[in-house]
Every structure is written in structure tokens, then in C-alpha cells.
Amino acid sequence: MAETAALTLDDVYEALRDVYDPEIPINVVDLGLIYDVKVEDSNVDIRMTLTFAGCGMGPYIAQQAEWRLAELDNIDDINVEMVFEPPWTPDMITEEGKKQLGLD
């Protein structure tokens, strides 16, 4: 029986690049919404935020992130935690995200 490769941080970030805030056409990674990712064995913990704390799309975005990660091999448990400290600012957008928004 062939062993499957262990899950990496890169795998998680690559998958999260398929998750979008429906109101902004940039993925959650390049938008700077992902604060922390921990991969331990087959468990993934994500700390993420929203562009503003009252954003009604928060549960939707968190669910999309969880569903996208569930498509990866070698994941047993996914925990997505919404945090609001520090508050998100446009400075958190990656260079790639700024290019997509035409801010470069």
C-alpha cells in the first residue's frame, strides 16, 4: 500500500486561495484574512478574520474554507476560528492582491 504525502502548510494555503469573500474578488489569502495556519499530523487549525467585524459573510466564508480544505487528502479535523484582533486593514493585502485590485 502506497503512503500518501503528509499535508503541508503550502497545501493548506494553496487550497485557501480558492476561497473568496463574495463581496471582493480576491481570495482570502491574498486579501490578508488568514492570520495563522497550524498543521499538526492530520489536523488543521486556522485563525482568520474578516474585512470588518460585522461582516455578515463571516460564517459563509469560514464554511467555504472548511469545505475546500475537506477536499484535501490526509485531513481528519479542520478548525476555523474567526478572530478580530488585530483588526484587518488594507495594508494586510498581499502584493498579488494589490495587483488584482489595481492598487500596485
Image (spheres, rainbow, N blue to C red):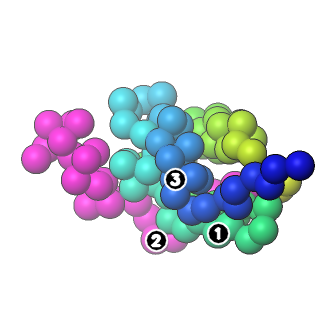
Q: Is residue 90 magenta?
A: yes
Find disc 3 in the rendering and name its residue. 13
Q: Which mark is residue 38?
A: 1
Instruction: Determine the residue positioned at 26% across, 61% down.
Output: 91
Q: Residue type at mark 3?
A: Tyr
Q: Residue type at mark 2?
A: Pro
Q: For this view, does 102 lie left or right of residue 4?
A: left
The residue range painted magenta reads 78-104
Front position in the image: 77 or 82: 77
Q: Residue type at mark 1?
A: Lys
Element under label 3?
Answer: helix
Comparing marks 2 and 1, which lies closer to the viewer? 1
Residue 100 percent across, percent down from the top left = 23, 36
Q: Mark 2 and mark 1 in contact? Answer it, CB < 8 Å.
A: no
- Mark 2 residue crowding within 10 angstroms, few (<14) / some (14–19) / many (20+): few
Q: For this view, does 46 lie left or right of residue 49?
A: right
Comparing marks 3 and 2, which lies closer to the viewer? 3
Element under label 1?
Answer: strand
Determine if residue 5 is in view: yes
Q: Residue furthest front?
A: 1
Element under label 2?
Answer: loop
Quadrant of the image occupied by residue 5: bottom right
